[in-house]
Image: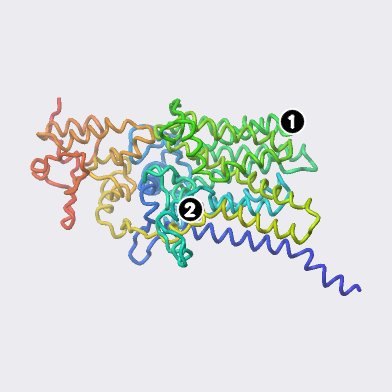
Amino acid sequence: MTDQKSSNRPRVTRAPHASLLVGVFALFLFSFYLMFHTFSYNSGTHEILIASKAWSDFGAHIPLIRSFSYGPNLARLFHGQPVESPLFPGEPIRYHFGFYALVGLLEKLGVRIDWALNIPSALGFFLLLGTIYLLSYILFTDRRVSLLSVIFFLFNGSLSALRFFQSHPLNPNTVTDIITNSRFPAFGPWDGNTITAFWTLNIYTNQRHLGLSYGIILSILCLLLLPSKKPAARGVRDAITIAILSSLLLFFNYPAALILAVCCLAVFAVRPDIRLPLASAGVMSLPALFLLYHVAHISSDIVWQPGYLASPLTPTHFVQFWFDNLGLQLLFIPLGLLFAPRSIRRMFLGPLLVLFILPNLFRFSPDMINNHKFFNFFLVIGNMFSAYALFRILKLYEKSPHKQLRKLLQIITGIVFVVALTLSGIIDFFPIVNDTKGAIPDVRVNNDAQFFLYHIAPTAIIANSTWFYHPASIAGRSLFSGYTYFTWSYGYNQVEREQILKNLYNASDLRAICSILGKNHIAAVELNPKPESYLAINFPLWLSFPAAYENTKTGLKVFLTRDLCTNITTH
């Protein structure tokens, strides 16, 4: 009898722990796979490899990273000076830079750029997955709800699957069609679809700071809501921890800090026992906020623009827009809130309403699509309530006196709803898996970038005739005016800068050129034989000047201001 009990005990006590560890390890590996699959490095050819679906976003991330590892921004930050965008130098940066400053620091310390970026990206995404599981368990004390919360996060519930089956009708090869697909079925607003591109995992592989930012928010909520036997002693520790995490969040993603504030205000309102550590953490975070205001431009005009991306804005179309984008989550999230215990509903109803309603009424940056970050976090929390709603629905069958029938109905209903809530996300996952990569020659094999790195001062401003993956950007040097969408969407006066470049490249004589260079503190001019289309370049004039650098294979030239204008009087 004793032997039998002892032999049974390991199976009873260890199985849940073993399965949990396996799940944690699987999510850890998945996080690293996701990040390294979309960004890597060929050590043989010394090329940076970027997934095609991340190509646009990394056109801003790589210059920002290199502005810290090869450029002047790390020194500026350490000296408490304003950080500047490498795509719009001359004023404080208008983008949350902390995550990419960390990546730049790692690269400066000798970590290769793919590891420097992918390690914090993967750990941040893993933190998000782990805290989704933990917070949902704290709220609902059911591991099944927690597991389903993670699954709902990974595989979105939009109706993009319907778009897929419109172009790939059901047939015996449907499974093959899904796993070999390389294009998102819906990628609004860029493809004209009402279903937007912001619900797939692509948003986390492109905006690498996002997963870590949300993970920090959920970590703080977990700290606040975990029960404690010694609340007084824990209060001091938690206040310090929350203050540190909040301070980091301000630099990593200050819009996410606003989301944290909304959540913490709700907790503050309904939980008197944790008001003191919350208030203390807020006070201790103020120095970080003051520092951020000093080194970056973080204010933005808030504009009344109802409807988000629903167009035309009518009640019917607005509801249809969100049903297309959220699918059955539009029903399950409210149901989960309705079923949830009153204390939990009081704590999260307000933040969920704020995070959904306000971005549907106001534009918080020049580009309306940037409001997606509020909706993404709305879904992170909302998915937990959807998972809880599903299990409450399945419990309704327990009233049936027929055990076998009850089990069968629970299984069928569970499968139907889980498939309906995740099929689009499963289909949306394979375009990431099947994505191709483009290669950017890194400094070691890039002669153009080497010239900028070794012959142009780190603080110099380069007049540029091209935008994406400019050799000066690869070398951590600043372009006078980067890609239009980046500079405009961050809130810079991109029209003025681009007009200056037009005047510079189309100038009629050297005196006019030197006047523009001097007024705008431009140290060098890059001239590409295939410039951006908005520039009308006076090639006969520019080609008459001696170049400080010329790539005979590509025709790229670099002219130094000091060479052109030493003997020119511009007054």
| Secondary structure found at label 1 | helix
Kind of residue indicated by mark 2? Ala
When the figure is inspected, residue 225 is found, relative to residue 177, above or below; the finding is: above
Determine whether, in the image, residue 296 is placed left or right of residue 334: left
Taking the image as shown, residue 570 lies to the left or right of residue 256, namely: left
Tell me the SS state at disc 2. Answer: helix
Q: As displayed, is residue 515 above or below residue 334? A: above
Q: Residue 155 versus residue 53: which sits nearer the camera? A: 155
Residue type, numbered disc 1 = Pro
* Residue at left offset 18%, top offset 44%: 559
Front in this rendered view, residue 200 or 228: 200
Q: Where the C terminus falls, by quadrant?
A: top left
Expressed as whole percent of the image width and height from the top left, the position of residue 117 reads: 46, 53
Indicate which disc residue 39 carries: none
Which residue position holds label 2?
A: 161
Picture residue at 40% right of the left edge, 56% below the top:
167
Identify which residue is drawn at 79% across, 68% down: 10
The N terminus - image quarter = bottom right
Colour theme = rainbow
**In this figure, which residue is indicated by the disc labeled 1?**
272
x and y percent of residue 124 in the render?
54, 50
The answer to which of marks 1 and 2 sits earlier in the sequence is: 2
Q: In front: mark 1 or mark 2?
A: 2
Q: Say which quarter of the image contains residue 37.
A: bottom left
Given residues 72 and 168, the one toward you in this image is 168
| Residue 351, image x, y percentages | 61, 34
